[in-house]
Image (spheres, grey):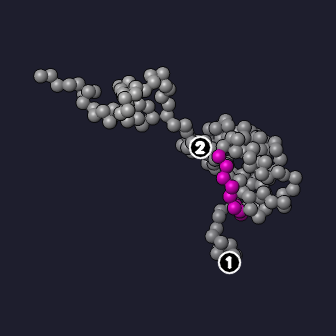
């Protein structure tokens, strides 16, 4: 009796598991599923899409309020959502920079050394479009920002607990 080859000794359940890259091994792709159907051989085998950049918009006491005139805050957030997930935050404690937008890198951008970029005074549609252009190109760590965004970028102050701010 000859011993079966190692490839045939893999249990059926293990053979049909996706690899770490998200692909199903070739042998499993042609096996019938438990319901009896054979997977379509022409179906693409792709990994899950990478997480995109994320955008945080401050919308509290100053940002996103009537204190910043001439800006359609809801339209700005909606426009940013066309390029990346947007999270609305309470006050980020940089009211002198209203409207504040923080562009957070994607997982790939973070792995490449990208860090969150804080943008202040984002009060015109042109700045919003520049942010979208950058995010769609990959954002922090993956694509250089349009030069004009350098005028909006700032380093936020270190955040201190409220008890320390009140006591100083």
Figure check: 10 above or below 167: above
Figure check: 23 above or below 80: above
**Residue furthest right in the image:** 70
The image quarter containing residue 98 is: bottom right
Where residue 31 appears, as percent x and y from the top left, is 35, 26
Give the extent of the magenta segment. Answer: 85-93
Question: Which residue in the structure is indicated by mark 1?
Answer: 167
**Residue furthest front in the image:** 35
Q: Residue at x 15, y 22 (%)?
A: 2
Disc on res. 112: none
Reading the chain from its start, which is encountered first: label 2 or label 1? 2
- Image quadrant holding the C terminus, namely bottom right
Query: In the drawing, does residue 28 fall left or right of residue 109?
Result: left
**Residue furthest left in the image:** 1
Figure check: 85 above or below 160: above
Q: Which of the pair 136/146 is nearer the observer?
A: 136
């Amino acid at each position: 009796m000859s011993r079966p080859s190692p490839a045939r000794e893999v249990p059926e359940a293990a053979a049909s598991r996706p690899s770490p890259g998200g692909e199903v091994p070739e042998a499993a792709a042609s096996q019938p599923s438990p319901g009896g159907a054979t997977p379509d051989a022409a179906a693409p085998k792709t990994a899950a899409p990478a997480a995109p950049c994320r955008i945080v918009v401050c919308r509290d006491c100053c940002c996103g309020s009537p204190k910043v005139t001439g800006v359609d805050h809801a339209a700005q957030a909606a426009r940013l959502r066309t390029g990346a997930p947007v999270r609305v935050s309470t006050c980020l404690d940089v009211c002198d920079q209203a409207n504040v937008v923080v562009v957070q890198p994607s997982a790939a951008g973070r792995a490449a050394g990208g860090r969150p970029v804080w943008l202040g005074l984002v009060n015109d549609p042109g700045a919003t479009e520049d942010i979208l252009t950058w995010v769609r190109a990959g954002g922090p760590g993956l694509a250089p920002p349009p030069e004009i965004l350098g005028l909006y970028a700032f380093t936020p102050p270190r955040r201190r607990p409220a008890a320390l701010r009140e006591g100083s």
